[in-house]
Image (cartoon, coloured by chain):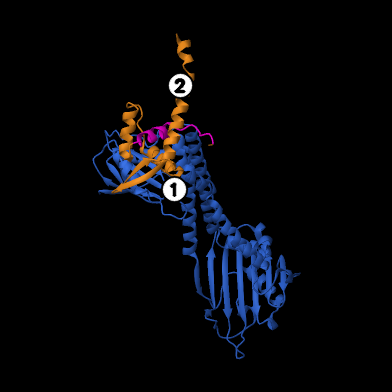
Chain colours: A blue, B orange
């Protein structure tokens, strides 16, 4: 293989990058191209070359291309232009070259880092601002309670997604803070007249441990997410079931199964870290054309203490009722029941929680549904 | 005229070098000669100072050969250089007292 790709140090670690490329060349790999996270090397005679990075921040809205004249001046001094990536421009001086260092005065080099420093310290603001505006619009339209409730039900249904998002957020935060700290420190040292260390010997043990752990956690969460998606199965609704949800037949309705606006009678089962979850819908044909329909979200929680919390969230996210429409109801065999209008109810028993929607509302019989649920969950 | 800030060594020598128009590499060689080999100016320093002095009107672009640009000092640049020379000379004269102390 005459070509090799390797992860390089972050763009704010100037000295580390210079050392990294010199070390690679000493091992017989010469830098050809630097990308976002990886650098491309080609096989070459091992030699002790020097690499230096010039940071060039172009004027606003201009592409970061180093002026030809600047490249010419650097080349005249013995610096060969290798490649660039963003604002970093990488030069190389071969073994034995007397090419002078770029800057006599570190304070002058510090000036070239100003924009990089500003981006590292404040670059997160536009992203956060866009998210804040999005969140504000969403909350204004839906209300904070509904947002929190949607978050809670999704968390119970697909925890690895939230874990992954959390770990990625933590990773982004860590890298942001670290970048800002590194470039600010480099800038301040240069301002004080301390030149850049072109061959830093720090081993970055803590950083490796932290970023390695975060990466491992992200991979683990990603694997859990994939695993949950693999084991989640969507099937046609069976005629009879031992699973903890009701069928229309259990409520005395009869008729042929049918589909409604293109959706078949089906059940999706997803075993998760916090709960086993069944999402079912059933439609029966009826001469009136308005046959009964049953929708259920049923959860078997690993931790029964979460039951009331989830029930509250389910009331808040019901698509046909508002949370304030739900009223508590006594039902034998169940721990708690809340009924809304004439088509929604939320029931809790031990670690079991369900939201049941029955249409048409004329035939909605909460007592019958509660009795059927109590029997179904006791049998289960 | 407002009092001029002291120049950096790089600015002083680049202006000196540009009394004879030249391009980047030529300037660096000339600076080395002028300073008796003491000053080896880096290309980053040279380029940074050139851009700044160009903005301030102390030097002017006089020609381009390929990707190399040739600069020359302007009247304003000469005045600034003379003012700086006068300042440094005064500093050296004032410091002559050191020779007495040293004896």
Residue A194: tell me if it is visible. no
Which residues lie in the magenta part? B2-19
Residue A194 screen position, x and y as percent:
46, 31
Residue A118 lies in the magenta stretch: no
Q: Residue A150 is drawn in which quadrant?
A: bottom right
Front-most of residues A18 and A297: A18
Residue B6 screen position, x and y as percent:
49, 31
Above or below, A242 relative to A11: below
Residue B10 lies in the magenta stretch: yes
Above or below, A275 relative to B63: below
Q: Residue furthest top?
A: B103
Residue B69 screen position, x and y as percent:
33, 45
Above or below, A28 relative to B82: below
Front-most of residues A145 and B73: B73
User: Which chain does the residue under circle 2 lie in?
Assistant: B
User: Which chain does the residue under circle 1 lie in?
Assistant: A
Q: Give the Cα distance between marks 1 and 2.
A: 40 Å
Front-most of residues B29 and B45: B29
Q: Which residue is mark 2?
A: B92
Q: Is residue A198 left or right of residue A242?
A: left
Q: Which residue is mark 1?
A: A57
What kind of element bears circle 1? Answer: loop
């Amino acid at each position: 293989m005459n070509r090799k790709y390797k992860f390089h140090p972050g763009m704010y670690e100037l000295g580390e990058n210079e050392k990294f490329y010199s070390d690679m060349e000493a091992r017989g790999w010469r830098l050809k191209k630097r990308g976002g996270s990886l650098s491309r090397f080609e096989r070459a005679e091992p030699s002790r070359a020097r690499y230096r990075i010039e940071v060039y921040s172009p004027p606003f809205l201009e592409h970061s291309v180093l002026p030809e004249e600047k490249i010419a001046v650097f080349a005249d001094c013995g610096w060969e232009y290798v490649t660039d990536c963003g604002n970093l421009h990488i030069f190389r001086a071969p073994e034995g070259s007397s090419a002078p260092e770029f800057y006599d005065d570190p304070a002058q080099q510090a000036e070239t880092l100003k924009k990089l420093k500003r981006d590292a310290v404040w670059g997160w603001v536009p992203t956060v601002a866009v998210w804040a505006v999005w969140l504000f619009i969403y909350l204004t339209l839906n209300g904070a309670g509904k947002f929190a409730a949607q978050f809670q039900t999704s968390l119970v249904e697909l925890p690895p997604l939230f874990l992954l998002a959390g770990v990625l957020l933590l990773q982004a935060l860590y890298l942001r803070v670290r970048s800002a700290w590194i470039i600010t420190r480099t800038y301040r040292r240069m301002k004080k007249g301390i030149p850049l260390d072109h061959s830093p010997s720090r081993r970055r043990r803590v950083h490796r441990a932290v970023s390695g752990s975060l990466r491992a956690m992200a991979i683990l969460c990603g694997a859990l997410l994939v695993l949950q998606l693999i084991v989640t199965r969507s099937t046609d609704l069976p005629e009879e079931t031992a699973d903890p949800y009701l069928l229309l037949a259990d409520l005395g309705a009869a008729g042929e199964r049918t589909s409604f606006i293109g959706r078949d009678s089906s059940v999706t089962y997803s075993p998760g870290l916090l709960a086993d979850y069944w999402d079912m819908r059933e439609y029966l044909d009826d001469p009136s054309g308005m046959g009964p329909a049953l929708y259920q979200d049923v959860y078997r929680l690993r931790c029964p203490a979460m039951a009331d919390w989830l029930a509250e969230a389910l009331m808040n996210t019901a698509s046909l009722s508002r949370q304030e429409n739900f009223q508590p109801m006594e039902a034998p065999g169940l721990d708690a029941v809340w009924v809304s209008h004439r088509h929604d109810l939320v029931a809790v028993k031990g670690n079991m929680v369900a939201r049941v929607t029955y249409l048409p509302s004329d035939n909605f019989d909460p007592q019958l549904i509660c009795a059927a649920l109590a029997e179904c969950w006791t049998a289960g | 005229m407002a009092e001029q800030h002291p120049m950096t060594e790089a600015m002083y020598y680049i202006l000196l070098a540009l009394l004879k128009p030249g391009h980047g590499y030529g300037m660096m060689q000339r600076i080395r000669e002028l300073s008796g080999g003491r000053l080896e100016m880096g290309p980053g320093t040279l380029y940074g100072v050139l851009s700044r002095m160009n903005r301030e009107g102390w030097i002017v672009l006089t020609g381009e050969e390929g990707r190399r640009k040739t600069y020359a000092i302007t009247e304003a640049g000469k005045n600034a250089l003379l003012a700086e020379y006068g300042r440094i000379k005064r500093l050296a004269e004032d410091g002559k007292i050191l020779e007495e102390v040293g004896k």
